[in-house]
Amino acid sequence: MSATPSMFAQSFFHGTKADLEPGGLIVVGHGSNFTEVGPLSWVYFSATLDAAVWGAELAAGDRPERIYVVEPTGPVEDDPNLTDKKFPGNPTMSYRSREPLRIVGEVTKWQGHPPERLREMKEGLARMKAEGGGEIID
């Protein structure tokens, strides 16, 4: 079998509770999934499905959790909110861009985190907020 360049292209994911369509754009100017800060001047995404699952599970609102396969339309950089603060070296493969993300598809079958782990994460975020932390480097 001969390989085509697209066979080895990197996939990127965006977790949210927004109901979006393939071909649409995720643009700057929306609030964070993790804090009440907003609007943000970056769009955030990851090359790992696990990080996108966290984004979907922690997003505000009562809509269904969604994970979209996205492609950046402009320059990309490491997300300093994770790489500088929590995970040096970017093992979560988390990124951001000031340019839109084009939605190329949706991941419809994915496994969420166990309820106990999700509860722990939400409690940790609430504790961080109560202590005055959780600022987003925007």
Image: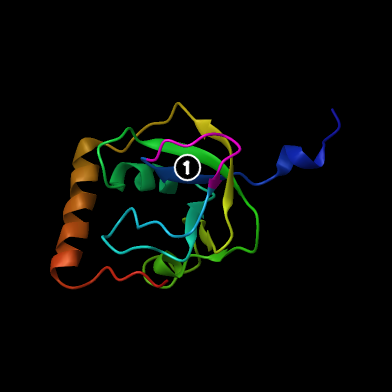
> Is 133 drawn above or below residue 97 in the view shown?
below
Over which residues does the magenta segment extend? 18-25
Q: Quadrant of residue 86?
A: bottom left
Is 89 in front, or is 109?
Answer: 109
The structure's colour scheme is: rainbow
For this view, does 69 lie left or right of residue 55?
Answer: right
Residue at (15% x, 62% y) in the render: 127
Q: Residues within 10 Å of mark 1 (few under 14, many from 20)?
A: many
Can residue 91 be seen? Answer: no
* Secondary element type, mark 1: helix
Residue at (35% x, 36% y) in the render: 65
For the N terminus, which image quadrant?
A: top right
| Residue lying furthest right | 2
For the C terminus, which image quadrant?
A: bottom left
Q: Is residue 92 magenta?
A: no
For this view, does 14 lie left or right of residue 126?
Answer: right
- The type of residue carrying mark 1 is Leu
Residue at (26% x, 42% y) in the render: 61
> Is 74 drawn above or below residue 121 in the view shown?
below
Q: Quadrant of residue 16?
A: top left
Can residue 6 be seen? Answer: yes
Q: Position of residue 53 (x, y in %)?
A: 39, 42
Q: Position of residue 93 (x, y in %)?
A: 51, 56
> Is 84 drawn above or below residue 36 in the view shown?
below
Q: Position of residue 77 (x, y in %)?
A: 57, 66
Residue at (21% x, 37% y) in the render: 115
Q: Which residue is mark 1?
A: 49
Q: Position of residue 35 (x, y in %)?
A: 27, 60
